Each structure stands twice: as structure tokens, then as C-alpha cells.
Image: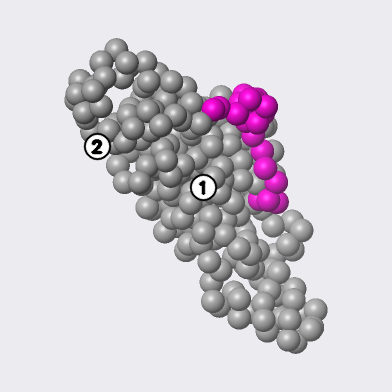
Amino acid sequence: MTPPAGDRDPAHTPVRVLLCDDHAVVRAGLLALLSSAPGIEVIGEAGDGEEAVALAAALRPDVVLMDLQLGSGIDGIEATRRIAGLPEREAEREAEREAGCAGGRDVEREAAGRGAAGRGAPHVLVLTTYDTDADINRAIEAGATGYLLKAERPEELFSAIRAAAAGRSTLSAPVAHRVLAQMRSPRPGLTDRELDILGQLARGLSNREIARALFISEATVKTHLGRIYDKLGVDTRAGAVSVAKEQRLLP
């Protein structure tokens, strides 16, 4: 039986985890897996982004294990951004102020015993099957502490959760490779013509309609789209528009 938060030894308090995945079977599998890991405790499950944000605010886990694709509603990127931006509770801030004013060890220990709830926003560890440059960049920019692929071994997942709880970043090896590759060979910026086409793309125009609007051939539109996809690290029209908005390339 887990002791009350105020009675725990902070040095031995388990890492409190909130799961967020829109597949119930996946959540059940993660719950069973994490239940076997010493020092890790699953305190809640969410099936969509809005629920994850609400539970993260209410439960204050150490780590939110976040999938990226969550069906309808906000995706894992937006949920990550909102969770990373959660403020501390007023009561917790008041307790910390009291501990500081009293200067007594008993009060300080009581505040520390509240565990993760007394700290800032939960850390978000992305756990997904997607490893595109666009997904990785957007997750990191949204405030994710780590980015793990679902193909990782259980031991790697356990280690990443503990690292995330301590505020340390963890990336799957393929993800780290892509990040380093981007840093070593950054993609060139979009040309004026590519930005023009991207703007038409955001309006929902087809290749033929873009060609007519810009007085170029469809073949030229397709060529430019291929270059836009490469530069933005995406492979779909929707992905290009989404990343362009994230990078503020569109008005």
C-alpha cells in the first residue's frame, strides 16, 4: 500500500506516471509493463489530448508518457505544449513560501514530501512510432523532455522515464541520429516561389489551381512541392502546412 504523500521519504518516492494513448489495448500493455518496473507508479490514464491535460493538471505526475497521434481533438504535440506550460498550484506555492519563511526543517520536509505536486509542470516523454524530422522538431519545440520510439526495449523505456522525472533528456538512438544530422546539415530555407506555393497550399488549392493562380505549369508545381516537402521534413500536403504554421512561414 502506498503511504500518504506527506509520509513518504522523497528519496524513495516512486516516479509517478500518467499514460496518454488513444488505444486502450496499448494503454493496458503499458500499464502491465510499467507495473513490473521498480520505482515507477502509473497514477492515471488518458485516451485523448484534452483528458491528458486535465489529468496532468489535477494529478501532477512526474512524467506524462505521451503518444503523438490521438485521434480526434488536440494531438500529442498540442497536449505536450499545454502540459509543459501548466503553472504551479497556488496552494503549493503558498506552502513553499511558508517553508521559506519558517526556516524550519519540519516544514521543509513536509513540503518536500508532497513529491511531484510541489514542483513545476510535469515532464513529457513522447512515446510514438513516428520519427520524422517534423514530428521530432515539433515535439521538442512544444516542450517534450524526451522522445522515445515504441520499438525500444522495456529497460530503455524504464530508464527514459526515470531520466525524464529528473529533468534529463532522452532520445531513442534513431531520433538522436536525425537530430544530429539536422544540426550538421540544416535544410536550406524556402525560396520566394516555394513560399508562394506553400501559401496556396494552405488555402486548400489543388496542384492545377495553384498552377493557374501562379501562371506556372502543374509539373513545376509538383517539382516545387517535392522540394518543400524535403526542406520541411514532411511527406504530405497537410504536414507541410502544419509545419509551416509551426515555423511561422505562413501569415
Residue 111 appears in the figure: yes
Disc 1 on helix, strand or loop? helix
Residue of label 1:
142
Q: Is residue 131 magenta?
A: no
Q: Nearer the viewer, residue 78 or 102?
A: 78
Q: Is residue 12 above or below residue 181?
A: below
Q: Is residue 48 above or below residue 83?
A: above
Residue 162 falls in image quadrant = top right
Looking at the rendered structure, the kind of residue marked 2 is Arg
Left or right position of 160 against 141: right
Nearer to us of marks 1 and 2 is: 2
Residue 3 appears in the figure: no
Q: Is residue 173 magenta?
A: yes
Disc 1 crowd, CA 10 A, few/some/many (<14, 14-19, 20+): many
Query: Which residues, given as a range, are shown in magenta?
Result: 165-188
Disc 2 crowd, CA 10 A, few/some/many (<14, 14-19, 20+): few
Q: Residue at x 57, y 56 (%)?
A: 122
Left or right position of 53 against 167: left
